[in-house]
Image (tube, rainbow, N blue to C red):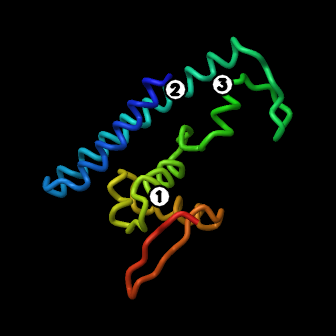
Amino acid sequence: MANSIQILKEISQLIFLVENSSIQKTDKLKLIKVLFVLKLKLIELLEKELKMEGSEGLKIKSQSDNRSFGVGVNMAKSSDESIKLSNKQDLIIQFIKDKSRPVSPNELLSLGIAGRSLRRYIKSLIDGKKIKIEKSGRNHFYSLA
C-alpha cells in the first residue's frame, strides 16, 4: 500500500512536469489525460485492496449511517478524500486540487468530458458549494470553495 501511495505521488509529479514542459499543447493534453487515467485506475485498485483488507480485519460502526465498515475503508474515508475518485465530479475537483490555482474551462476540457456534460457537472459542484467561480474581466475561472 505504501508503494501504491508513492506511485500516486510520482504520477502527480509527472503531471506537473508535463504541464510545465515545452511539449506541444495537443501532445501535452494527451499525456496528461493518460496520466490521469493511470491515476484513476491505481486509485480504484487501492480502494479494492482497502475493501478486501477491511473485510478481513476488525469491523467498526460508521458514525454517519450506522453501517459496518472495515478499518481500512473507514480510515480511507476519514483521511484526505483524495483517494476516492469514483465519478467525474471527483475527477474535476482532483484536477483543480492538482493545479493549486484557478482553472479555466478550456483546461477542464482536457479531462475528456464533453462540453455540455462538463457544464452540468460544474453547475452541480457550484450548487454543492465545492467549487466557486472567480471572474477576471470577461474570463472566468474555477477554484475550490
Residue that appears at 68% across and 39% down: 78
| Direction top: furthest residue | 56
Q: Amino acid at mark 2?
A: Leu
Query: Residue 32's spot in the image, x, y percent?
Result: 29, 47
Up the image or down, 126 lies above or below 14; here it is: below
Separation of residues labelled 2 and 1 (CA atoms): 27 Å
> Which one is in front in this view, the residue at disc 2 or the one at disc 1?
2
Residue that appears at 62% across and 16% down: 52
Tally the numbered discs. 3
Query: Residue 110's spot in the image, x, y percent?
Result: 32, 55
Separation of residues labelled 3 and 2 (CA atoms): 11 Å
Please tell me whether mark 2 sits on a helix, a strand or a loop.
helix
Identify the residue under disc 1.
Answer: 117
Residue that appears at 55% across and 20% down: 49
Relative to 75, 18 lies left or right: left
Q: Residues within 10 Å of mark 1 (few under 14, many from 20)?
A: few
Query: Residue 55's spot in the image, x, y percent?
Result: 70, 16
Up the image or down, 83 lies above or below 2; here it is: below
